Amino acid sequence: MAKQFPRLEPAHREFIQRQRVFFTASAAPTGHVNLSPKGLDALRVLGDKAVAYLDLTGSGNETAAHLLADGRLTLMFCAFEGPPMILRLYGRGRALRRGGEEYTRLLASGFGGVEPLGARQLILLDIELVQTSCGYGVPLYEYEGERPTLTKWAEAKGPEGLDAYRRQKNTRSLDGLPTGLFDEET
């Protein structure tokens, strides 16, 4: 049976810290629903009502567009090793732009000030509800390591190439919604 909590409990934090992948789900009031896997040690628990993850440059920027349009965001963690469990964090999110004051402060406090090449933005989730469920149907997998592909791709692009790529691919969602990625520049 699913159990609901108003905030993260210590056991939830421990579970999150053991996971090597999580999933984000977002949607605007109309259009496509987005579901994306995230890894590379990107997530930080900021407290019992907030988490953030460092979002790397990708082929689209749906989450940022959906957060501007509606704000709803769900993160899901599944135990692929050890005892079964699924943990979902429901709430309202927002994207913190690279170079902004809040981004810089969170990067320093949560990520040791280290910004990997390819960092696009930080996504902050204010948690409204935590839900756990059994996870009995989630298969067991062994962790072999992180894929180096995204890091190598970003290194090959370089800072200028990443900027050009983001401007071409990350300013509008699949449904044509703005992502706000470069709004502070105008």
Image: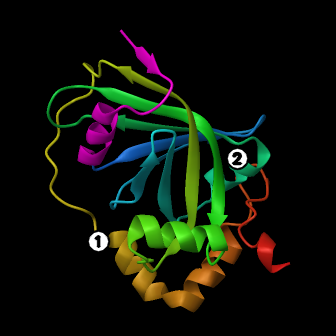
Q: Is mark 1 on a helix, strand or loop?
A: loop
Name the residue at the right extreme. 186
Depth check, front residue: 64 or 111: 111
Q: Is residue 51 left or right of residue 104?
A: left
Disc 1 marks which amino acid?
Pro
Identify the residue shown where x is 42% and y is 33%.
8
Q: Residues within 10 Å of mark 1 (few under 14, many from 20)?
A: few
Q: Give the range drawn in magenta.
A: 1-19
Disc 2 marks which amino acid?
His
Colouring convention used in this rendered image of the protein: rainbow
Residue tagged by mark 2? Answer: 66
Q: Where is residue 138 in the image (x, y as percent from the top left)?
A: 27, 27
Separation of marks 1 and 2 at Cα, in angstroms: 28 Å
Q: Quadrant of the C terminus?
A: bottom right
Identify the residue shown where x is 55% and y is 32%.
90
Residue tagged by mark 1? Answer: 148
Note whether 43 is above or below 50 in the view shown: below
Q: Are marks 1 and 2 in contact (CB under 8 Å)?
A: no
Q: Is residue 22 left or right of residue 159?
A: left
Residue 28, which numbered label?
none
